[in-house]
Image (cartoon, coloured by chain):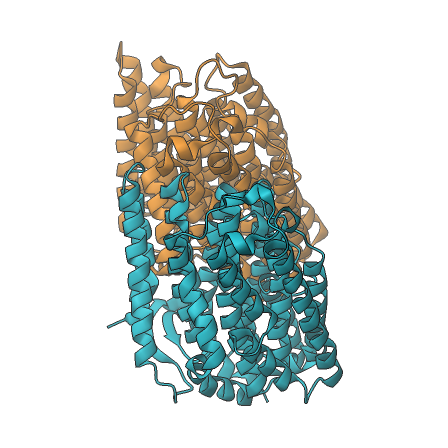
Amino acid sequence: MPWLSLMLFLPLLGACAVLAIPKDNRQAIHVASLATSALSLMVSLGLFFAFDRNNPGIQFAEKADWVPAFSIQYSLGVDGLSFPIVLLTTLLSFLSLIASLGIRERIKEYFFWFLILETGMLGVFTALDFFLFYIFWEIVLVPMYFLIGIWGGPQKEYAAIKFFLYTLLGSLFILLGILALFFGSTPHTFDILELARQNQQFSRTFQIVVFLALYIGFAVKIPAFPFHTWLPLAHVEAPTPVSVILAGVLLKMGLYGLLRVSFPILPQATQWFLPILVLIAVINIIYGALVAMAQTDLKKMVAYSSINHMGYCLLGIAALSPTGFNGAVLQMINHGIITGSLFLLVGVLYDRAHTREMTAFGGLGVRVPIYTGLMTLAAMASLGLPGLAGFISEFLCFLGAFPVWKWYTVASVAGIVITAGFFLRMLQKVFMGPLNAQWGNLPDIRAREILSIAPLTVLTVALGLWPRLALDLMNQTLIYLSTLIQ
Amino acid sequence: MKNLLLLTPELLLAVLALGLLVWDMLQKTSSARLTLWLGVAALTLTLLAIVPQLSQKLQGVGSLWVSDPLGNFFKILILLATLWTLLLSMEDRSIPGGQMGLYAATLSLAALGMMLLVSATDLLLVFLSLELVSICSFILSGFNRSDPASSEGAMKYFLIGAFSSAMTLFGISLFYGATGTTLLTAMAPTSNPLLLFSLLFMLVGFGFKVSMVPFHFWVPDAYQGAPTPITAFLSIAPKAATLGLLLRIFTILLPHTALSLTMLFQVLAIATMTVGNLSAIFQTNMKRLLAYSSIAQAGYMLIGFVTSDPLGQEGVLLYAFTYMAMNLGAFAVAMVLAHASLPAEQDPYHLRTYDGLAQRSLGLSLLLTLFLLSLAGIPPTGGFIAKFYVFGAAIRSGFYALAVAGILNSVIAAYYYLRITYRMFFVSPARETPIPVGNYLATTVAFAAALTLAIGLYPSPFVESVKLSMSYLP
């Protein structure tokens, strides 16, 4: 049974179904999209139990010739690197769809694009053929453009086009890199794993040129300084569920690309680039945190904190050790879960108050206790409180990086302090102090909203207490990956 | 004289086209649709006549022309584009009703000229067929005589066309002076200055037809003024045919690498895509926008021509074929919208008519999005595969500057293509009336979409046939 294909194309099937439903039939559209996305989630959960945690290689592989003239294959598979992210994707997509039930305008188009987006993202993380990978990589762009541009905030059109052109420019450089790798390899191949096995045959100069081309594309997605300027705009303007996907999954595509493609295929260039990468990581951490601190808009603050959190991932992978890799991949998962819930929570508040200015609130803790509890937990997890998910992964990133990059790591720890600073200040401004009379009858969080957030909260606690839940999945692969580079 | 049989498709088309003309004269009140259907029948018969010759490689009488897979590929492409144009014409309202026979016959004769052009190996035949194409195109672009814009476009087209023909002819005479023959196959390429001069003069004429910068000035006006099916036709068929000719002359018979003209072609390719894209940004009329976009697309195709290795040549073929599908689709949707616009609106092709299309007809706006994404080269569409092919050729042959220029241009192009999707999806409509789509237009759009997606999702058969087509004489 081609389980991965099934998981991958169920949402696409849902999208086609949605297209066939008349646009006034809201319920049918909701059911069709939730059902296909839920089935996709179910398949991925089934694979979670079938996944062999001691096997560092590719599992559930599928292969078929696609364009034999260029030895392009339809090749899917997951390993310890991609599988946790695949799980994150199916989960976040499903939860975001639940959160999207509140969308009122043009829902047919909304769910159509959303489901296409899910297929695109899953494709990126399961494709093992470079050509296929690129196709899915680009497919992600188009629905995202529409989702931000139609259902976004006041500056949505500008945000959408900026996001699109920025990432398109980056991904076209990836295309050049892919072509160079194809024609540089003998025999010519698009197989990512085969290219990694052949990595000895590429000269150092060739590696560096290709690495830079790929890096531009990946860095835009991460987003690594200085390619991050599209992110705050896109995040703030996007509707809540789309922000969740953007932060939770799309940002992981860049890091995944580095780990899956750049590092194993171009090891010499990786070594060459590492000093720059670690510098960028520190800038991301400190700069992201400082800018987040300066925000008064809740969503902008969370958006900039993403830049900071991606910095930890970069620091972790710059260690080139199993510990660092584990930390980075775990941080990717945790960031998806935690920031996902933060965005959802900010969205809940915005739906009621129609503002996201911290200063406009105050004392909400009395008025909306359940909401306050959930938000506090998510914020604590994001600032790295021990016992919650964020701590473990950030700790592992530091632990991995410290032996190699002592001073950079020391500098990065400052990021944690700043992060704690702005999250605590946010909690204080919004939830503590005297209740702002304006919000005297603000309703607390509703059941449907809890339904979309609770699984993430549970996971935040679970991964904080029992990180092996995720670490066991990835450990073997990441150990193998680090030997491949060194 | 047995070799004359090689010309069966061309002879058949010529006879049928003239027959159409006669038939139209004999009828007192001929139905426009029926005449067009007869044109469709003529073209279909010609297509069928090509089939038995598909894979043969033979020299024609006196070596004026050849019959080989390369030529046949372009002949099929031209005939398909012409067929499609006739289908589009069935619902066009700007063609004067009583002259359908003339219209269909002129279109068929233009196709005939192009078929000869792509198989010519002698400069005499090249010139004759080029003139046949040009004269027919002038007539067609000015066909809507009641519209001053149409006449203006046709006039510009004619003047610049006549000028470039003269240049070509001058180049041919220089060629004869340098080599003592008009036969392209007779001599080995050398860097004889006179020969180079002659080729450059000829290039003016060819560049005019391909809409290569700096010979592109006629394009926007002629495209805007011509009846829309003709605009679609002009943007595809003559361009593809001349590319076929350029491919034959400059990559096979007299390779530009041996003449050290590669640098020149590289510069021309980059200039063509950049000028086309940068000018397209500022257009507010769909036909003009597509006109400039077609200039830029020619620039991408020239990439494959510059690399001139088998990969690049195949890339040109695949690109031309994909371009036919996606461009025809875009023009067909533009026609649908122009028909749906109110008479009060000044310009039925103004981009304003696209405002809020998604809320008036989601299907139509998704299809146009597909064509535009394909033109922009974004997967999973045919346009991506085509770009992939030519960029791949550029990387493999070491033309990195060309590849990077192509990429930067793709981003610029994405900007103005997306401006249309912006209007369709992000702007609310001025009125919410649904859009009527005629049967013929619906069929064309559906075919174009199917082809665009098919090339993108399952490129194998197309890649294979392009590979088979890259076999030629000598």
- Along the line of sight, the residue nearer the viewer: B267 or A119: A119
Residue ID at (35%, 35%) = B84
Quarter of the image with the C terminus of chain A in it: bottom right
Which residue shows up at 40% across the image and 18% down it? Answer: B95
Q: Is residue A105 visible?
A: yes
Q: Nearer the viewer, residue A457 or A71?
A: A457
- Depth order, front residue of A439/A230: A439
- Judge left or right: residue A365 versus residue A41: right
In this view, the residue farthest toward the left is A1
Q: Quadrant of the N terminus of chain A?
A: bottom left
Task: Write down which chain is painted orange.
Answer: B
* The furthest residue to the top: B28
- Nearest the camera: A183 or A83? A83
For residue A249, side relative to residue A268 (left or right): left
Question: Residue A140 at what x, y percent from top left?
Answer: 47, 56
Quarter of the figure with residue B213: top right
x then y, percent, for residue A132: 43, 65
- For image coordinates 49% across by 17% down, the residue present is B345
Q: Is residue A97 above or below residue A79?
A: above
- Residue A384 drawn at (x, y percent): 59, 73
What is the count of numbered marks?
0
Which of the 4 image quarters holds residue A327? bottom right
**Colour chain A is painted in:** cyan
Residue A390 in picture, x, y percent from top left: 55, 74
The vertical placement of B171 against A184, above or below, is above
Residue B299 in view: no
Examine the rendered structure and indicate whether residue B114 appears above or below residue B247: above
